[in-house]
């Protein structure tokens, strides 16, 4: 996230500048630190909740049963 977020913001600004230039409209990209932080925190929450649900489902399977089926 430390690398991806800045690259995404910079890439998005460049892409929007190119698209706006080709469309002939002014380019005023606005990306606040607060909005980027909210998106990053929401992503982390979804990521952790997904991992917890999957871990709970997997923990119900007996190891011996899965090895026998394997």
Image: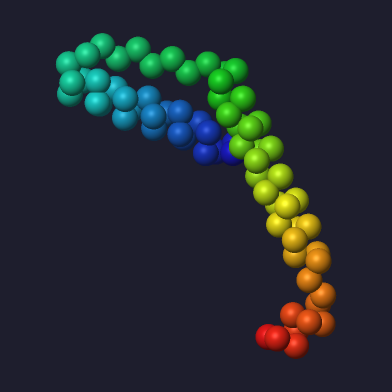
Q: Is residue 22 left or right of residue 50?
A: left
Q: Quadrant of residue 43?
A: top right
Classify 53 as above or below 10. below
Q: Is residue 21 left or right of residue 28?
A: left
Q: Quadrant of residue 66?
A: bottom right
Query: Looking at the picture, how far across and down is residue 21, in whole percent?
Result: 21, 20
* Residue located at (69% from left, 37% from top): 45
Q: Quadrant of residue 26?
A: top left
Classify 2 as above or below 68. above
* Residue located at (31% from left, 30% from top): 15
Query: Looking at the picture, how far across and down is residue 57, in whole percent?
Result: 75, 61
Q: Is residue 69 left or right of residue 61?
A: left
Query: Looking at the picture, how far across and down is residue 64, in whole percent?
Result: 82, 82
* Residue located at (67% from left, 49% from top): 50
* Residue located at (65% from left, 31% from top): 41
**Foreground residue among 37 and 60:** 60
């Amino acid at each position: 996230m430390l690398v991806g977020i800045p690259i995404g913001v910079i890439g998005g600004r460049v892409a929007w500048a190119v698209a706006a230039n080709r469309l002939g409209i002014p380019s005023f990209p606005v990306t606040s630190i607060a909005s980027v932080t909210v998106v990053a925190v929401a992503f982390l929450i979804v990521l952790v909740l997904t991992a917890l649900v999957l871990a709970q489902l997997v923990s119900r399977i007996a190891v011996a049963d899965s090895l026998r089926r394997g």
